[in-house]
């Protein structure tokens, strides 16, 4: 029966959605009645069965006919396949017979040409015979084919033996005269050798080069005078003549791809390296530095000449020699430094911009490698020369004295520093031409030694020594002191010397760092980790720190007598507020004396002048506050005078980096922040002193608010400045401990408090109000 969408839907939807007249779709469908309708009688049923049987018969008939057709097609295609196979086999047979004919004829011709030494024809024929023979590898079981293959092998063997004999006859190993020479026969024989076993070609090359260099072995034997280093130029002149002679006589005899000229030069280099090593080992005690450098220079020049003339393609042909990896591009500036033909070095500034790396020399070290084991002579010599140079620097410094104030030398880099690094650069150029291995490490170690000695003997050793006696001032002398009547502990020349040493140490630090980077670029990759000049750079950094500290200590010590005088003045008896006190004038005078000199001499190292200013401020302000605490029993007027003095010092300190300069520069923000924070604390202390201590609660709260300091010792020092009695101080201290705010949870509960610090604008406003108040009282 035919299934429709209505057949799969419930009967209640069939009439509504898909109307149908099919009795199978009726809701009251009865299968028995439906079958009885179709087959009302038994005869109708039998007729249906007969029809079905006829249908199956027709289907079977169609299937049989299809199978017969398929069989017929197979028989037709089978015949076609047989014809294809027959054609293919016939073609192969004809081709094989042609190859066999060619092989048989070729072998006969090859044997005949070999006997007649017709190498020109043999070269082409042999390659063809070998190619044809490759087609018969699977037929080697056939006796005739195997026989032809054996004949080819015999012919190849006879050719190799015959060609070697011809070369031996033309170029005999013994005797000074060459019996034969270049000929067309030998040229064609080389073409045949290209087809034969590679060992034949190698043997020809080996024998020819050995015969060609036999004269060199005799002329430059170890016992000959010309074999020594002082006549090393004669070796290279000899090979140059021989290469020219070879090009003229034998250049066309050998195939171009054999690179015979380069092979002769390379073999000469290997022999020369071996012979030089042997003679230097025998006469090691006679090797001097100048002689060694002369030989190295001439040898590296010759290696450079080889690199310009040849590609180095034959260097990897030798057994056990691996093809070198292409190194990474280097930016080492020393690569551009070469030694001139006259032996003079071409000097370049260390700070010169880097150039692109020159092409690698494949011949570098092919001879000069033999000098590495004797470089200790050169290194020992440089050790001695550098030691003498340091001693000369010391003696020259003592003889000439420190740089003169007011001259161009004041504060400048010491000339000896530049001399040291220029000399080191020359040595680096020479050493890098010889080896990028252990000798470079040894030389770097030597230079590290003298970098430290230079830092110790020339720089640290010449820093002025501080004097123990400060020569303090009395109050009377301080009050009578006039501007310029007292000099600082260090003279102007000594200040210039300190600045000059500082500038020199900075130059050494920067140059040493550059040299470390260039050394790492130059040495072998496996030795990079052994190049480390951190210790030397730290030494120069220490010299810089010590120099700055000396400058700070000198100015700091110059201000000490003034601060001492401040702490000993009778502030309780000050009757009125006037101009700044004499001790302030003294401090300002010393600042104006020292700072401009230091600034001018550190003009090239501005950052270290800033460090000096910061370190001096960090030292002076705490010392000033400590001396404030030593001032006992300060009256209201005395506190106002001290507050005015503090403001004057604060103004001077803020202008300290540009004090006495025609060009006013804004002080660095980091420096300004230190000054404002420190001097604001001093002002807050004096404001607390000026405040009445009654009522006590107000005084304590005001102290905590202004100073934000929970240390009872500081609070007690403030009470001492006010001149309170011990009994009064006890109650005040107890109240102070009670009024301290409770520290937040999680803190260590220390005495320090966290309060917002007044801004510089707020403090300036308060100072202006105080100044107005003082003027009114006056």
Image (cartoon, helix red, strand yellow):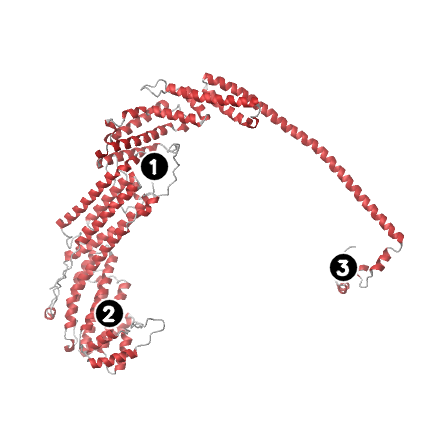
**Quarter placement of the N terminus:** bottom right
Count residues near mark 2 (Cα–Cα under 10 Å), then give few for <14, some for 14-19, many for 20+: many
| Residue designated by label 3 | 7
In the image, residue 641 sits, relative to residue 378, either above or below, namely below
In the image, residue 99 sits, relative to residue 517, either above or below, namely above
Residue 651 appears in the rendering:
no
Which element type, helix, strand or loop, lies under badge 1? loop
Total marks in image: 3
Mark toward the viewer: 3 or 2: 3
Which element type, helix, strand or loop, lies under badge 3? helix
Instruction: Kindly indicate whether the residue at mark 2 contacts the one at mark 1 (C-beta within 8 angstroms).
Output: no
Dot placed on the residue nearer the N-terminal end, 3 or 1: 3
Where residue 257 sits in the image (x, y, percent)? 41, 29
Number of the label disc, if any, that sits on residue 361: 1
Residue 452 appears in the rendering:
yes
Q: Rounded to the nearest whole Å, what is the CA distance between mark 3 and mark 2?
A: 104 Å
**Quarter placement of the C terminus:** bottom left
Instruction: Kindly indicate whether the residue at mark 2 contacts the one at mark 3 (C-beta within 8 angstroms).
Output: no
Identify the residue shown where x is 89% and y is 52%: 43
In-image side of 673 versus 54 (left or right): left
Q: Rounded to the nearest whole Å, what is the CA distance between mark 3 and mark 1?
A: 93 Å
Dot placed on the residue nearer the N-terminal end, 1 or 2: 1
| Residue designated by label 2 | 679
Where residue 696 sits in the image (x, y, percent)? 25, 82
Which element type, helix, strand or loop, lies under badge 2? helix
Where residue 198 sits in the image (x, y, percent)? 44, 27
């Amino acid at each position: 029966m035919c299934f429709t969408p209505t057949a799969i839907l419930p009967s209640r939807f069939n009439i509504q959605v898909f109307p149908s007249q099919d009795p199978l779709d009726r809701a009251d469908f009865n299968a028995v009645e439906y079958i009885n309708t179709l087959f009302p009688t038994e005869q109708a049923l039998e007729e249906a069965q007969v029809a079905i049987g006829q249908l199956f018969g027709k289907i079977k008939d169609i299937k049989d006919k299809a199978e017969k057709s398929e069989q017929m097609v197979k028989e037709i295609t089978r015949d076609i396949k047989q014809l294809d196979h027959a054609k293919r086999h016939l073609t192969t047979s004809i081709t094989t017979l042609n190859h066999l004919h060619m092989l048989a004829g070729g072998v006969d011709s090859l044997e005949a040409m070999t006997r007649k030494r017709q190498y020109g024809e043999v070269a082409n024929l042999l390659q063809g015979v070998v190619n044809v023979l490759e087609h018969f590898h699977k037929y080697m079981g056939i006796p005739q084919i195997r026989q032809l293959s054996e004949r080819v092998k015999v012919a190849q063997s006879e050719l190799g033996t015959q060609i070697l004999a011809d070369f031996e006859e033309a170029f005999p190993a013994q005797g000074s005269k060459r019996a034969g020479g270049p000929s067309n026969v030998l040229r064609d024989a080389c073409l045949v050798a290209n087809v034969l076993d590679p060992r034949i070609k190698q043997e020809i090359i080996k024998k020819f080069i050995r015969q060609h260099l036999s004269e060199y072995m005799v002329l430059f034997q170890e016992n000959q005078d010309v074999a020594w280093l002082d006549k090393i130029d004669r070796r290279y002149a000899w090979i140059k003549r021989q290469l020219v002679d070879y090009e003229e006589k034998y250049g066309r005899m050998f195939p171009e791809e054999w690179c015979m000229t380069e092979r002769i030069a390379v073999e000469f280099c290997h022999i020369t390296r071996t012979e030089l090593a042997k003679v230097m080992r025998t006469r090691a005690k006679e090797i001097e530095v100048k002689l060694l450098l002369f030989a190295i220079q001439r040898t590296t020049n010759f290696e450079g000449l080889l690199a310009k003339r040849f590609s180095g393609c034959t260097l990897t042909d030798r057994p056990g020699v691996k093809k070198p990896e292409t190194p990474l591009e280097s930016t080492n500036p020393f690569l551009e430094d070469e030694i001139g033909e006259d032996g003079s070095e071409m000097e370049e500034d260390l700070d010169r911009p880097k150039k692109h790396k020159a092409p690698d020399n494949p011949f570098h070290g092919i001879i000069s490698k033999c000098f590495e084991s004797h470089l200790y002579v050169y290194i020992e010599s440089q050790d001695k020369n550098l030691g003498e140079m340091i001693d000369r620097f010391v003696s020259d410094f003592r003889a000439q004295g420190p740089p003169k104030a007011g001259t161009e030398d004041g504060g400048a880099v010491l000339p000896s520093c530049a001399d040291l690094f220029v000399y080191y650069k020359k040595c680096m150029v020479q050493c890098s031409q010889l080896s990028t291995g252990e000798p470079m490490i040894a030389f770097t170690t030597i230079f590290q030694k003298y970098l430290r000695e230079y830092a110790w003997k020339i720089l640290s050793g010449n820093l002025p020594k501080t004097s123990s006696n400060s020569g303090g001032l009395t109050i009377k002398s301080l009050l009578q002191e006039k501007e310029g009547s007292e000099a600082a502990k260090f003279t102007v020349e000594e200040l210039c010397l300190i600045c000059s040493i500082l500038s020199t140490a900075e130059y050494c630090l920067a140059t040493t760092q550059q040299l470390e980077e260039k050394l790492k670029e130059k040495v072998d990759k496996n030795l990079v980790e052994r190049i480390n000049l951190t210790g030397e750079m730290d030494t120069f950094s220490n010299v810089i720190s010590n120099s700055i500290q000396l400058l700070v200590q000198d100015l700091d010590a110059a201000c000490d007598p003034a601060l001492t005088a401040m702490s000993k003045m009778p502030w309780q008896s000050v009757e009125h507020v006037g101009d700044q006190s004499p001790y302030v004038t003294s401090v300002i005078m010393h600042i104006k004396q020292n700072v401009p000199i230091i600034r001018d001499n550190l003009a090239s190292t501005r950052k270290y002048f800033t460090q000096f200013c910061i370190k001096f401020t960090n030292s002076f302000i705490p010392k000033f506050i400590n001396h404030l605490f030593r001032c006992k029993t300060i009256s209201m007027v005395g506190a106002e005078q001290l507050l005015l003095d503090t403001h004057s010092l604060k103004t001077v300190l803020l202008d300290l980096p540009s004090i006495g300069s025609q060009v006013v520069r804004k002080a660095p923000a980091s420096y300004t922040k230190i000054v404002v924070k420190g001097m604001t604390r001093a002002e807050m202390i004096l404001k607390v002193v000026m405040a009445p201590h009654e009522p006590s609660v107000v005084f304590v709260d005001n102290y905590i608010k202004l100073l934000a300091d929970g240390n009872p010792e500081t609070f007690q020092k403030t009470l001492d400045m006010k001149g309170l009695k011990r009994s009064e101080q006890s109650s005040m201290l107890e109240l102070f401990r009670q009024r301290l705010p409770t520290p937040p949870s999680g803190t260590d509960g220390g005495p320090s408090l966290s309060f917002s610090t007044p801004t510089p604008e707020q403090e300036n406003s308060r100072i202006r109000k105080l100044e107005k108040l003082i003027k009114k009282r006056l």
